[in-house]
Image (spheres, rainbow, N blue to C red):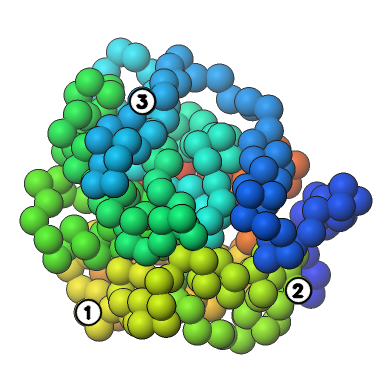
Amino acid sequence: MRADAPDPQVSAVVDELVRTGVPEWHAMSVDCARRVEDDVFGGEVRVDLPLVRDLAFDGPGGSVPVRVYRPTLDEPRPVLVFYHGGGWVLGTLDSVDGVCRDLATRAGCVVVSVDYRLAPERPFPAAVDDAFAAVEWVWANAASLGGDPARLVVGGTSAGGNLAAVTALRAREESLDATLAGQLLCYPMADREDTDSTHENADGPLLTRRDVAWFWEQYLRSPVDAHNPFAAPLRARDLSGLPPALVVTAGFDPLRDEGVAYARRLAEAGVPADHDHYPSMVHGFLSLTGAVDVADEAMDGVADWVAATLSG
């Protein structure tokens, strides 16, 4: 499930971060970790687009900021509602800006990035409620955003992949006017339980076993929440009737096995589920397309899947 060693280009990125003195996430205060996350992943703009606009809507707990990326201004495009990673504790619209620009350009779709409420100030289910409300708002306002409400996908990285999976589950359970065409789950946090990959990759790189445990501790109100499928979608008893999925996993990621398990369970439930696994990659590698060739190729694969799913 993993290569003998991380990709050399990934190792170079990790070595550079080590030289800058970035501690593990759990070793920092929440405020410090948030600043570091933005500093590390909110870098320079690599892809120009015709329109990038910051907006907000009234969510269940107050105003929810969003950033809309449009690859063209001449016709309605399919829409990807995207949730950033960061263990439900870190992350902003800026920290995932590069990924969203890449996806909008390569997949030819409108991307709406959602700045959901963060723990520990706003623990579960605040992020879940904002994620679900964002889909409802995007569907209702798709035309003004340059999007086609009939072609809508949810997606995200890490904790954002969790929120995309949970939003798909919740959309099946509750009345949602929008019909989801697919779910893009990039190295998702799917369950709190330890796995083989949690131990194999306990020391990272970029995400450690202790980081994962710390994120869950900040997010959940009590241990009881860990059994709620809207917090841990791998706990859902029935995954049938969900939209088609692409699950992306990395060999040197503590979250690898829960992503693999979720892809397998979706397929067993009759859900069309593609699984792209990259044995030499690490957690968060889709943010490294400018420095890592395999990450750039993987982003092309993700974008191709999004475009194909939204063209149906």
**Marker disc for residue 260:** none
The residue beneath circle 3 is 55
Q: Position of residue 279 (x, y in %)?
A: 66, 68
Identify the residue shown where x is 15% and y is 45%: 178
Q: Quadrant of residue 110?
A: top left
Side of 228 relative to 161 (left or right): left
Task: Work out whether residue 1 can be spotted.
Answer: no
Residue 308 appears left or right of 90? left
**Could you say which is closer to the camera, residue 226 or residue 17?**
226
Nearest to N terminus: mark 2 or mark 1: 2
Please identify, in this view, whether the residue under mark 1 or under mark 3 is nearer the observer: 3
Amino acid carrying mark 1 in the image: Asp
The answer to whether 277 appears left or right of 18 in the picture is left
Task: Find numbered disc 3 in the image and state the secondary structure of the residue it sits on.
Answer: strand
| Quadrant containing the N terminus in the rendered view | bottom right
Left or right of 304, for residue 26: right
Q: Which residue is mark 2?
A: 203
Taking the image as drawn, is residue 204 in sight?
yes
| Cβ atoms at labels 2 and 1 below 8 Å apart | no
Q: Secondary structure at mark 2?
A: loop
Q: CA distance from mark 2 to mark 1?
A: 33 Å
Dot 1 alpha-carbon crowd within 10 angstroms: few under 14, some 14 to 19, many 20 or more: few
* Dot 1 or dot 3, earlier in sequence: 3
Residue 33 image position (x, y, % from top left): 67, 52
Q: Amino acid at mark 3?
A: Leu
Q: Nearer the viewer, mark 2 or mark 1?
A: 2
Q: Nearer the viewer, residue 203 or 267?
A: 203
Look at mark 1 in the image and give the residue it sits on: 238
